[in-house]
Amino acid sequence: MALRFRPVDGTFYELFTDSARGLVRGADLLAEVLADGADRATVAERMRVAEHECDEITHDIVRRVNSTFVTPFDREDIYSLASGLDDVMDYMEEAVDLVNLYEVERLPKQLAQQVEVLQRCAELTAEAMPRLQAMKDLDEYWIEVNRLENTGDKTYRRILAKLFSGKYDALEVLKLKDVVDSLEKAIDAFEKVANIVEQIHVKET
Amino acid sequence: MALRFRPVDGTFYELFTDSARGLVRGADLLAEVLADGADRATVAERMRVAEHECDEITHDIVRRVNSTFVTPFDREDIYSLASGLDDVMDYMEEAVDLVNLYEVERLPKQLAQQVEVLQRCAELTAEAMPRLQAMKDLDEYWIEVNRLENTGDKTYRRILAKLFSGKYDALEVLKLKDVVDSLEKAIDAFEKVANIVEQIHVKET
Amino acid sequence: MALRFRPVDGTFYELFTDSARGLVRGADLLAEVLADGADRATVAERMRVAEHECDEITHDIVRRVNSTFVTPFDREDIYSLASGLDDVMDYMEEAVDLVNLYEVERLPKQLAQQVEVLQRCAELTAEAMPRLQAMKDLDEYWIEVNRLENTGDKTYRRILAKLFSGKYDALEVLKLKDVVDSLEKAIDAFEKVANIVEQIHVKET
């Protein structure tokens, strides 16, 4: 019996990179919607388009996983990574959407710090994806994302304490908490992506 | 060495159909609890029974997956589909439970639209399950559920904007938001089921 | 071709037991933070350390799963069990953290009941983990955890009804609901662990 060999498909790495680049764009739109004088409705619309494009890439990856005989690494890991990247985008889109929808007035200034964390995580992730092919120089990426998530967590807790300090009324707290939670979930989702990459690395090397 | 063949078990399709029929019943009870003059406690009790029956079917499916040698499609997909259907029921039960528990007075009328979306999704899902056996005529099902989820999402956002418009006090918003979020999660869970079916279809055909 | 045999690694059972013992400690710290006159900040700090230790064990399990040729049961089940135990710890840490962070004043006394349920679940889980090796006498464990989760669910609903009864103002409800929801998620996570153990048992016997 002869074994057939097929070159491992390079497009998976390209698709992961495309997906992560979508996250860089999403994080930038998040920064834009929070800026003074932003046309929130327009930014939210552009975010919706960006999220939709990211969705398409995810679907494309899943379709290829299901129809490709040889995959660069475990099918389930490809699937986890694709969904993980998609989750980040969903939470960022949720945050932009809520800022627009709730017509939030006074945003605690620490929100900008969370968005900076998201922008940095997105850049690191987009830079790391092409390195999956050689499975090299990935540890600095996941270490840094874990560190950023820790910083984000401390800021998150400071924001919560501020929200409940009595300076905001209950309805305002309800709105702001939804926005802040979306940002927190997006940061956590970046960490989850980094953990998936670490796991793939352990398996494949 | 002789290979033993065993006919692929038909009962999986029957169990999925039973589970989805439970969702039709659940969506109907949801409509009932929101009707004027409903005896909410009684409807909530009937919903609890329906949810429990659905649970039993899910357990039955999982047990069979683990003890059956040949399954109609990938074990993990059977498991995902069973859990996916179960999740829908859990969220619908949660919604009924909260309407009863919180003694919510003024329900925004758009809630009825969300329940109609759920009823339609449930019917489509129950009709699609038996078609899994032939793996035919399934695309119209998942396309329509995705369309319904989109409509539901727009309504959800309109309800949120209304809740925070200042017409409701904070405590009322807290209660209503819990109910509305449960409905939203149920609709999303229907879409997830449709996506699982699409994925199974891609793999098996 | 010769098959190589390797003794199945005993340390998986030990690591699961260590992880579950961390949950006993976590549940005790939860009881401590709710006691009158507790130094909440200090307890929260000790909880953070305990949660971190639990994290390390989880990482250790995942690393071994990925690098061990023969595992005592399915890789994916080991992974699910490890993550399941870790989830319980995360929710308990969240609860302790929020009690401290929100400076919650009046805690409904039923919270103590929920913590007792968590302590009992943790003990049962820690006692059950070593029995995974022989796959014996596990049913009493998962039956009792399921029963406890049912009790916890009833208490949860009573607490919610109380929170929304008008005795608490909206901001206080927001804070307390976060704490109560964390406890509820921790109890649910214990049930999920018990269900995973049941599933492993069905497969392996």
Image (spheres, coloured by chain):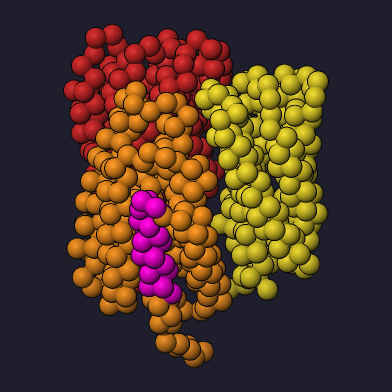
Chain colours: A red, B orange, C yellow
Which residue lies at the image location 67% right of the left edge and 58% below the top edge?
C146
Quadrant for residue A132, please give it. top left
* Up/down of C160 relative to B149, above or below: above
Give coordinates of residue B121: x percent, y percent: 29, 59
Give coordinates of residue A31: x percent, y percent: 32, 17
Which residue lies at the image location 46% right of the left edge and 79% below the top edge?
B70
Which residue lies at the image location 59% right of the left edge and 27% below the top edge?
C168
Residue A75 or residue C68, whichever sits in front: A75
Q: Is residue C72 left or right of residue B120?
A: right
Would you say residue B73 is visible in this rendering? Answer: no
Which residue lies at the image location 52% right of the left edge and 78% below the top edge?
B68
The kind of secondary structure the magenta stretch mainly shows is helix
Residue A9 or residue A169, whichever sits in front: A169
Position of the N terminus of chain C, as image quadrant, is bottom right
Give coordinates of residue C25: x percent, y percent: 78, 38
Query: What is the span of residues highlighted in magenta in the rendered image?
Result: B15-37
Q: Residue lying furthest front in this view?
A: B37
Position of the C terminus of chain C, as image quadrant, is bottom right
Residue A115 or residue B36, whichever sits in front: B36
* Up/down of B26 relative to C170, above or below: below
